[in-house]
Image: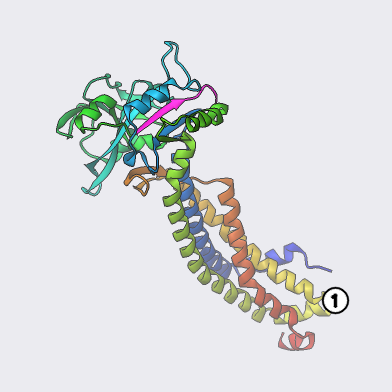
Amino acid sequence: MTLPLSYIARNLWVRRLTTVLTASGMALVVFVFAAVLMLAAGLRATLVASGAPDNVIFIGKGAQSEVQSAVSREQAALIESLPQVARGPDGQALVSREVVVLNSLIKRETGTRSNVPIRGISQAGWALRPQLKIVDGRALRPGSTEIVVGASVARQFAGVEIGRTLTFAQRQWLVVGLFDAGNTAFDSEIWGDAEQMMQAFRRLNFSSVLAQLGTPEQFAAIERAVAAEPRFTTELRTERRFYEDQSKALATFITFLGVFLSVIFSLGAIIGASITMYASVATRTGEIGTLRALGFPRRSILLAFLLESLLLALAGGAVGLLAASFLQAITISTTNFASFSELAFSFSLTPAIVFNSLVFALVMGFVGGFLPAIKAARLPIVDALRAG
C-alpha cells in the first residue's frame, strides 16, 4: 500500500513558505549550472557553425590556429591542382588563399584594447561562406585597401563605422561595409583583400588555404592524396573539425570551472533541503504514527518523504531552467584561448542541458531528502502517536 501523490503535493502546499525558500535555493544552483553549460554550448555552436561540411582547411603542420600557421604559395598552387577540389562555372578551383593577423581595437564599453582577427581573403572566400551577407554598405573591391567589418565587431568596438579609416600595418584601410555571418565566428572578424594584407604585413606565406570539395564524402580521398604527395608540408582538416578544435580549450575551461562552482553551491541547497525535510518530519510525527497504524509500511513512508524532496527539487530545477532560458537573448565576448582574439557568442539552451540540469536538481533533492526520509520511516508507531 502506497501513499497517493496528491498527499505528498498537499504537504508541500501546506508549508508554502519553506517550500518556496528551499526551492528558490535549488533554483539558484540550477540556474548557475545551466548557465555554465549554456555558455560552453554557445561557444561551441558559434565556432562549429563557422565550418561548412564540404570545406577543408589547410594549415601548416603543428599549427594550432591560423595565426600561427604558414602556407607557402607553392603549397597553395598544389592544393588548387587537387582533383577533389570543386571548380566554379569558370573552371577555376574554389580555393581561397587567406592570411589572418591580429590587430587591437578599443572596446566601446570599457575603453580598453582587445585583439580582433583581420582576415585577408581571395575572391573565392565569399563563395565558400554562403552564410555571410553584406547588410550595410558594400563588399570590398579586390586588390584595394578596403575592409568590411563583422556585426559583432561593429557592436563592440569603436571607430569601425562605415566611412571611417583604420590605420594598421602602416596603411590606411577604409571601412566600406558591414557583414552578418549568421552568429558564427566570422562576425568577430574584419575582412580585407589577401594580397593587400600580405604586402602590408610583409608576409611571405599565407595563414591557411580554404578549399571546397566536390562532395563531403571526398574528404577521405583528398586526405589520401595529400598523404601520398611528398611535396605537401601542410595538414588538412574539415572546416567544421578545425573550428571544433578551436573551441575545446575554452569550452572545457568554462565547463570545469562552472561545474566546480555549481557543486559547491549545491552543498548549501542540499543542506537547505535536509533542514526542510527534517522539520517536516518533526512537525508530522503524529501524522506518521497514524499512517503506520492504518497499515502503511515503512517503505511507503520512506518513499513519500523522498518523493516530497524530489518534487521540491524538480520545482526548483524547473524555475532555475526557466530563468536561465532568458540568457539566450544575451551576447557576450571573451578571449578565445586558441587564437588570443576577441570572440562574441550567445548562450545556447539545448535538450541535453535541460535534461542534465533537471537530473542535477533531482540528485540534490535525493541527497537532501534521503536521511530525513529514513528517519521518518524508522519512527516507532507508539512513540510517534504519543508525540502527536
- The percent coordinates of residue 340 (x first, y second) are 32, 47
Front residue of 51 and 200: 200
User: Which residues are drawn in magenta?
Assistant: 208-215
Toward the top, the furthest residue is 90
User: Above or below — where is 362 with respect to 123?
Assistant: below
Quarter of the image containing the N terminus?
A: bottom right
User: What secondary structure is the magenta-colored segment mainly?
Assistant: strand
Q: Is residue 304 magenta?
A: no
Q: Residue furthest front?
A: 230
Amino acid carrying label 1: it is Gly
Screen quadrant of the C terminus: bottom right
| Labels in figure, total | 1
The image's colouring method is rainbow
Circle 1 is placed at which residue position? 295
Q: Which residue shows up at 50% across the image and 48% down it?
A: 325
Picture quadrant where residue 221 is located: top right
Left/right of residue 110 with respect to residue 222 in the rendered view: left
Residue 39: % across, % down: 45, 50
Viewer can see residue 20: yes
Q: Is residue 349 above or below residue 3?
A: above
- Secondary structure under tag 1 reads loop
Report x, y in % for residue 29: 50, 62
Nearer to me, 157 or 296: 157
Would you say residue 125 is visible in this rendering? Answer: no
In percent of width and height, residue 179 lies at: 34, 28
